[in-house]
Amino acid sequence: MNREGVVESCEVKGILNLTANTDAGAAAIVAVNKAQLPPSFNFATHPKVDKKGYEQQGILSLKGGKGFPVGRGVGILRWSYGSDDAAPISINCWPEDEGTGRILVNIEMELTRKDVVLHDVNILLPLGTADPPAIESI
């Protein structure tokens, strides 16, 4: 993001994790409706996943009929998307030096895509100091 709040590059990444809690769950087969997946996203299966079964039928299972490990999460499918329009939010920062050793920063955030719902959004602001900021209002 540049100083004007314009996204110059952005990448969205995700992973589908499966945790089998029982022996029956270890034999799970996950069916993915690949017709519903966005064509602009890139998808990759874990090396232990039967790639041919995923590509031909949208089925995520381990190679050789093996079961998933019980009690341990396994990432079985990753996805990524990179584009200038990947970020559904715009952020404008307005720093203002108050002349007293303090800098007041107003941050405006706007959801730019109304078809998206955001969860667990983290925005990191480099402060250039180890001192915590004083947040006056949200």
Image (cartoon, grey):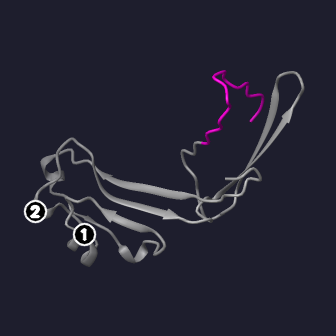
As drawn, is 67 to the left or to the right of 74? left
Q: Which comes sooner in the sequence, label 1 or label 2?
A: 1
Instruction: Kindly indicate the quadrant of the structure image that contains residue 126.
Output: top right
Local SS, label 1: strand
Q: Please state the horizontal and vertical placement of residue 83, each as a whole percent of the image.
A: 57, 66
As drawn, is 34 to the left or to the right of 71? right
Compared to 76, does 33 lie above or below? below
Local SS, label 2: helix
Pointer 2: what residue? Answer: 65
Pointer 1: what residue? Answer: 59
Q: Is 128 in front, or is 132?
A: 128
Q: Is 90 in front, or is 8?
A: 8
Q: Is 107 in front, or is 29?
A: 107
Residue displayed at 73% across by 24% down: 134
Q: Which mark is residue 28?
A: none
Q: Is 106 in front, or is 128?
A: 128
Residue displayed at 17% across by 44% down: 70
Residue displayed at 21% across by 72% down: 53
Q: Which residues are magenta?
A: 123-138
In which quadrant is the C terminus drawn? Answer: top right
Instruction: Kindly indicate the quadrant of the structure image that contains residue 71.
Output: top left
Compared to 17, does 29 lie above or below? below
